[in-house]
Amino acid sequence: MVRIKIINILVTCAFLVLIFGLIYLEVIQGKKYRVLSNKNCIRLLPQSGARGKILDRYGNVIADSKLSYDVMISPQGSANREEALMGVSHVLKISQNDLREKIKKDYVSMSLPVVIARNIDIKKAIALEELKPDLAGVIIQLKPQRRYPYNSLAAHVIGYLNEIDRWRLTRLADYGYKTKDIVGFGGVEEKYDYFLRQEEGGLSVEVDHRGRFMRVLGFKPPKNGKDIQLTLSLKIQRIVESYLADRKGSVIIMDPYTGEILAMASSPVFNPSVFVDRKGYSIAGIFNNRDAPLINRSISGTFPPASVFKVIPAVAGLETKKISLSKTFVCTGSTLIGRREFNCWSKHGEENIIQAIAHSCDTFFYKTGLLLGPLAIHDYALKFGLSKSTSFELPYESGGFIPSPLWKKVNRFQNWYEGDTANLVIGQGDCLVTPLQMARMMAVFANKGYLVTPYIVKAIGGKDISIYQKKFSRLDLKDSTIENIRIGLKEAVSLSTGTGNVLSGLSVSVAGKTGTAQAPPGLSHAWFVGFFPFKNPKYVICVFLERAGPGYLSCVLAKQIIEAMANEGEI
């Protein structure tokens, strides 16, 4: 009897344990296990939308998407997989062993197809579709792929696409970005990635306990990204890039009244298509290129402005009345400052401010700089927007640098000397600017007194945002100051002795300033920054050639570009 009672007690306890276990699993932990069960029986098959287009000011496509064909195979069709692999191998010319390795490497579960070939051409896709009845488990999936119809045209403005890196993922995870997402790098592709990127959709399917497909539960259609319309003119951009090709440098053409960028070219260039279709291309070759083709020299490169900078002390001198139109200095070819001779590139004789701009007389500006002092030059440079970014919307814009006595004292523990002022007044020494800053500076004289903010995006998703982009401020300059500088810039081209005289033979009147920036130990940088037509300016042009030699060469390039624009009816 005792033994039977003990057995009954043990059986009762066992049942109680089972009952409490069921209560724990069903009632207390029921919700948790139901969620896990649903996750285990539901699979998501993603489908991608198309990335938004990038258009020029007239609606011409600069970047869009094309249909790409990926070949997938379902692990569920394992019984006839070898036959399927044989057929795919024959059409794609890929060995069966390579296909097996691909399946093994990327396998996730029985319900999820494995991509075994990406971006096949349409002829092969059609051939596989025709063989599909005999290729169990093979799927041809349509997938939008980025397309750049003009290859490297405007590449630095557009940017390129690549797999998201850790730095971007850390910053953008809260905005829905995840590992292996394809995102923009540089240019419009990066700055406006959030608008351009598509919204993924897909199928929700139910699978059994072995991961085999049972039924479709739902479908969410993918959404395309928003289109971005730029202020660029493809016609002008083509002209600019065709003449800049095979040289290092930058060319910018801008509307002086609105700040719209009509063309922005940087050379050397790269082809953003390389990052989409990597077949036969070396991405490492682009990144390791010593000429840095990925850098947009128009906004990220900083260089000494040389004589182009002289308009700043010219304005400062006239505004502060340290000089006037009647004030002259005699140029004998050099000037003694302290114990050092500072040379001029020629002997100009007696020069006033207009003549000094036209002839780019260093001596005149050395003496003007000493009258002004470094602080006045520095402050007027800042007034023209130098030493800080222009607030241009593309990423990685440099601010440049304008030195001052305080900076030298704090950072180099050195005093400022008159020789430093002499270097600053002609745009040498520690002075650094970007080509975009120089174009913006010259626009002040084209539009007669307004500092504009350059911009390049006109509309997003069909909505015109240019009204928010147009930002400008009136500089507190006398009309006479602006007019005298304009005359000097005009005579730099129109006079036979002007430094930009090569531009005088054009059908359109041009005004501007040349510059030859010393950059030892190599050749000098060549600058020309101007505007045209002179009376009613339509364009500002900045031509910068890196280590090309004298500024004359940039004038030659500017002439070729302006001639081509006139022939194309753009002036």
Image (spheres, rainbow, N blue to C red):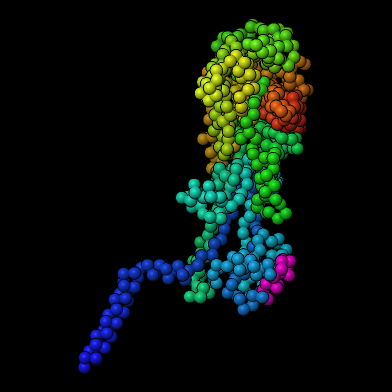
Location of residue 555 in the rendering, given as x and y in whole percent from the top left corner: 74, 26
Location of residue 428 in the rendering, given as x and y in whole percent from the top left corner: 64, 22
Q: Label the magenta part by its dominant secondary structure.
A: helix
Q: Could you say which is closer to the camera, residue 467 or residue 85?
A: 85
Q: Residue at x 73, y 21 (%)?
A: 500
Q: Residue at x 56, y 55 (%)?
A: 180
Classify residue 361 by image quadrant: top right
Q: Residue at x 69, y 30 (%)?
A: 544
Q: Residue at x 71, y 15 (%)?
A: 344
Location of residue 195 in the rendering, given as x and y in whole percent from the top left corner: 53, 47
Report if residue 100 is visible in the image.
yes
Classify residue 488 by image quadrant: top right
Q: Residue furthest left?
A: 1
Q: Is residue 95 magenta?
A: yes
Which quarter of the image is occupied by the C terminus?
top right
Q: Is residue 464 left or right of residue 127?
A: left
Q: Is residue 173 left or right of residue 570?
A: left
